[in-house]
Image (tube, grey):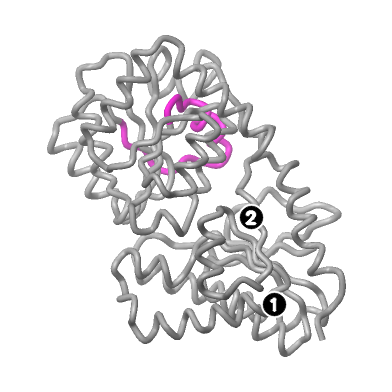
Amino acid sequence: CLLYTGTPFPGQSDRMTVRKAVSYDRQSLLRRALSWCRFSLGAAWLLLRMPRHVPVLVVTNPPLLPLIACVVGWLRRRPYAVLAWDLYPEHLVAIGGFGDRNLIVRLWRRVNRSVYRRARVVITIGHRMAAAIQETAGDKVPIAVIPNWADTELLRPIDKTDNAFAQRWNQVGKVTVMYSGNIGATHGATLIADVAKLLEGDSRLRFLVIGDGLGRAALKDRIEELGLTNIQLLDYQPWTVVPLSLGCADLAFVMQDAVSARYSVPSKVYSFLAAGSAILAVTPADSDLHDLVTQHRVGLAVTEPEAIAIAAAIRGVLDKDGELDRLGRNARSVSESHFSSKVATEQFRRGLESMVGGVRQ
């Protein structure tokens, strides 16, 4: 098979060829849009040149990929499946980019309806996301819910005394509350600084924020404004360091705003689970993330993005003897049993059987 991706990927094998595409540029909205367009054009050209009837699996980032697969599939009589990691235009409506009755939004949803209905299968990563897709496309669309996964061999718990990253950033002997990933403008990143301020006097813990994005500057300004010394802001780490950085986390800060929580499940959750980190989920009660954390007992779920409530939840788990360790062990166990690459591979195999079982006439 052929993998066309803009994300760094560890080479290829006898069974898979990796073709490097344009990387996703998060530095500004304009650069995001340009990187999306360049990737989409490259994908369209690749699909047009591929042999007829070769099945294709496309993801929803960039959001034009499913439409491209649908159009090229019609031209080349090629079956395709859609992996919906994010739901557009719902995300854009949720963050206030467009109104719900905007003409572009209505046309986009109509296009999505055709794309979903022509697909052999639509795979998504949460049950509430599946329900949202059915609202758009109807009950007859075949939908498979397959959660994201992590490499449980690469990512695993690491004792901080054996962790060079933890040693470098003075995390040995401390409880590390970590945020790692894109620091988006809509993620409420300054909330992390406000929580750190409330816990400034607690010598048991330190905060680490790793990443970049549109919200990083505001977070940095807030840290300086509050004069915080218990929080460290770092750049993205090299891929070779990521297993060590994630393995340093004791409590992983994951935030979702109320309007978009129904339309995604942050993929970082599964990496943290594999590393044996408990999850600190700031998310509405009716989200897939809330269900994951509470049903599997792998962390804390705070339903309101309020610094006082989040700080209280952190204090509560630290004050309960052995509770954070128990949550971390649960996280690793659930990762191996539910969210490993082995489990996901089998689920994808079953989900994609309909796509490779023959070509729709």
- Check whether the beta carbons of the residues at disc 1 and disc 2 lie within 8 A of each other: no
Q: How many marks?
A: 2
Graded by Cα atoms within 10 Å as few (under 14), some (14 to 19) or many (20 or more), the crowding at tag 2 reads some
Of the image marks 1 and 2, the number of the one nearer the N terminus = 1
Chain part drawn in magenta = 232-251
Circle 1: residue type: Leu
Query: Is 82 situated left or right of 263 in this image?
Result: right
Question: Does the image show residue 347?
Answer: yes
Which one is nearer the viewer's eye here, 256 or 127?
127
Q: Residue drawn at (71%, 62%), measured in percent from left and top?
A: 3
Query: Is 347 situated left or right of 322 in this image?
Result: right
Task: Please state the horizontal and vertical placement of residue 319, each as a whole percent of the image.
Answer: 34, 13
Q: Is residue 274 magenta?
A: no
Q: Which mark is residue 145?
A: 2
Graded by Cα atoms within 10 Å as few (under 14), some (14 to 19) or many (20 or more), the crowding at tag 1 reads few
Circle 2: residue type: Val
For the C terminus, give its image quadrant.
bottom right
Q: Residue drawn at (66%, 38%), measured in percent from left and top?
A: 338
Q: CA–CA distance between discs 1 and 2? A: 28 Å
Q: Residue drawn at (49%, 48%), measured in percent from left and top?
A: 288
Task: Please state the horizontal and vertical placement of residue 204, each as a whole percent of the image.
Answer: 32, 14
Task: Please state the horizontal and vertical placement of residue 178, each as a whole percent of the image.
Answer: 39, 32
Question: Which residue is tagged 1?
Answer: 46
